[in-house]
Image: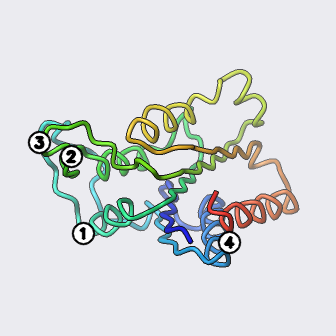
Amino acid sequence: MARILCIVGHTRRGTFCEALGEAYARGARAGGHTVMLVNTAALNFNPVLRGAYEELQPLEQDLVAIHEALLAADHIAIIFPLWLGSMPAILKGFLERILQPDIFPAAREGKFAKPLAGKTARVIVTMGMPSFVYRWWFGTHALKVLEHNILRFVGAGPVRTTIHGSIEAVGDEKRRAWLQNAEAIGRQAA
């Protein structure tokens, strides 16, 4: 069974992204996996990397356990809303903080750190626009940045993605289906 770190990258609690994270975690636990569910809105940390990768910024207490869970995880799930064409700043800051190169032994030894090597990932993104517009017109820019420039860059793969578009326009039935889907992929740790 897999050890999973599920991250909801949002600035508020009680969102549909949080509901997706809870459904994913519920499914994973039902599948026999262990899960740490994290919501960036509930954390106390500075999302700004003040040292600009030139000096180590010590992790706040809220981030220490998450960093350890990240290293121990077999699979990482990241759920966020598309804002201004990208991930919310709090999620980007969270990733910058827990992926600081100098907090990994290989980087401290002068080697290129791939701390997520051997880990798989799932990214679920919600957005106001229709998903086909995001795929066709915008080329899934935010997903490509997260998948290629962050997750794969530090070793994760494969990275699977799920896009839920027109989030404000869909009804309760569609949202229930999306929650059931999140639970199903959580059960498979996929």
Tell me which numbered mark, 3 or 2, is placed earlier along the sequence. 3
25 lies left or right of 12? right
Instruction: Report how far apart the C-alphas of labels 1 and 4 lie in the structure.
Output: 28 Å
Q: Name the residue: 52% across, 75% down.
A: 34
Tell me which numbered mark, 1 or 3, is placed earlier along the sequence. 3
Instruction: Report how far apart the C-alphas of labels 1 and 3 lie in the structure.
Output: 19 Å
Tell me which numbered mark, 1 or 2, is placed earlier along the sequence. 1
158 is higher (above) or lower (below) than 10: above
Q: Which residue is mark 2?
A: 106
Tell me which numbered mark, 1 or 4, is placed earlier along the sequence. 4
Q: Which residue is mark 3?
A: 55
Disc number at residue 61? 1
Q: Which residue is mark 4?
A: 27
80 lies left or right of 127? left
Q: Name the residue: 47% across, 56% down.
A: 11
120 is higher (above) or lower (below) than 71: above
Tell me which numbered mark, 4 or 2, is placed earlier along the sequence. 4
State the quadrant of the C terminus: bottom right
Percent x, y for residue 131? 75, 36
- In the rendered structure, which amino acid carries the disc numbered 1? Gln
Instruction: Report how far apart the C-alphas of labels 3 and 2 lie in the structure.
Output: 16 Å
Percent x, y for residue 76? 50, 56
Instruction: Report how far apart the C-alphas of labels 3 and 4 lie in the structure.
Output: 40 Å
190 lies left or right of 90? right
Give whichever of 132, 151 is nearer the camera.
151
Q: Label 4: how many residues lie within 10 Å, few (<14), some (14-19) or many (20+)?
A: many
Q: Name the residue: 67% across, 78% down.
A: 30
Dot 4: element: helix
